[in-house]
Image (tube, rainbow, N blue to C red):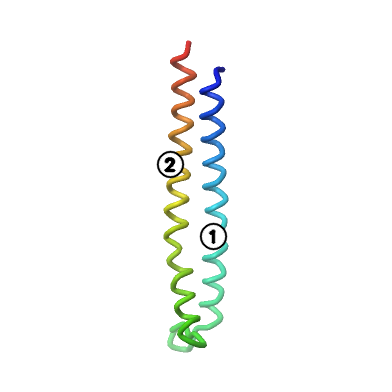
Amino acid sequence: MNSITLIFSAIGLGLIYNAVRISKKIRSIHRELDKYEFEHRNTGGIVEFPNFEAAEKHKKMRASSGLDTLRAMSLGFGIFSLLIALGALVFSK
């Protein structure tokens, strides 16, 4: 195995591991938000907040689109790096 294969394999595995960690973080954030919404629903099914700032914070946490994008990029570049490593391994012979 040559050094290019090792380098790209390490990068790819690291990025995929990072994507898994981000997925777990997103899951825990969404679970906390779901729990809050469950505990603060009124009889009409509407989530109530104590003040405007709490509603804004909840809305921003629910969006979490930055983490979703980061997870997708990390996973995509990780798989791409592993494919480069596989190509280097196959074509180096």
Q: List x then y, in percent, for residue 43.
A: 47, 89
* Residue drawn 57% across the image and 50% down it: 21
Position above or below: 92 against 85: above
Left/right of residue 79 with respect to residue 3 in the rendered view: left
Quadrant showing the N terminus: top right
* Residue drawn 48% across the image and 69% down it: 61
Which mark sits nearer the N-terminus, 1 or 2? Answer: 1
Residue 27 numbered mark, or none? 1
Q: Secondary structure at mark 1?
A: helix
Q: List x then y, in percent, for residue 47.
A: 46, 82
From the image, tell me which residue sits under label 2.
76
Please tell me whether mark 1 or mark 2 is closer to you in this view: 2
Q: Secondary structure at mark 2?
A: helix
Left/right of residue 63 with respect to residue 8 in the rendered view: left
Q: CA distance from mark 1 to mark 2?
A: 19 Å
Position above or below: 62 against 8: below
